[in-house]
Image: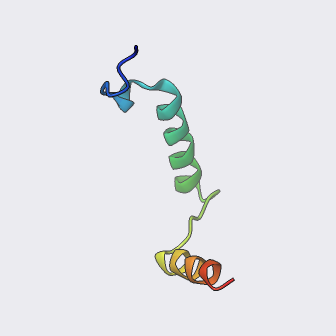
Amino acid sequence: MEDDNKEIDLWDDEDLLNEMKSRMDDYESGKDVGISWEEVKQHLRDRNTK
């Protein structure tokens, strides 16, 4: 039986690090402008009223 509770060091995960770098590059270049906290809250409110 495998140990399902083993600790994972995410800083050793090359795929994760590459994804994080890609997202930061997009944000810093303006390709991805992100969304505000107000937009997130409004989206959740709208979703809960349907």
Nearer to the camera, 33 or 42: 42
Above or below — where is 26 with respect to 12?
A: below
Tell me what residue is drawn at x 32 percent, y 28 percent: 5
Quarter assignment of residue 19 = top right
Tell me what residue is drawn at x 59 percent, y 50 percent: 26
Quarter assignment of residue 2 = top left
Nearer to the camera, 47 or 22: 47
Number of dots carrying numbers: 0
Nearer to the camera, 46 or 24: 46
Q: Position of residue 35 (x, y in %)?
A: 56, 70
Q: Where is residue 1 in the image (x, y as percent from the top left)?
A: 40, 13
Q: Which residue lies furthest to the bottom in this view?
A: 49
Above or below — where is 16 with respect to 48?
A: above
Q: Residue furthest right?
A: 50
Q: Where is residue 11 in the image (x, y as percent from the top left)?
A: 36, 30
Nearer to the camera, 37 or 48: 48
Tell me what residue is drawn at x 60 percent, y 59 percent: 30
Quadrant of image for the C terminus: bottom right
Tell me what residue is drawn at x 50 percent, y 81 percent: 38
Q: Along the horizontal axis of the image, is 12 left or right of 21? A: left
* Scheme by which the image is coloured: rainbow
Q: Along the horizontal axis of the image, is 4 left or right of 46? A: left
Q: Along the horizontal axis of the image, is 32 left or right of 6? A: right
Q: Position of residue 3 (x, y in %)?
A: 35, 19
Above or below — where is 39 with respect to 33?
A: below
Q: Residue furthest front?
A: 1
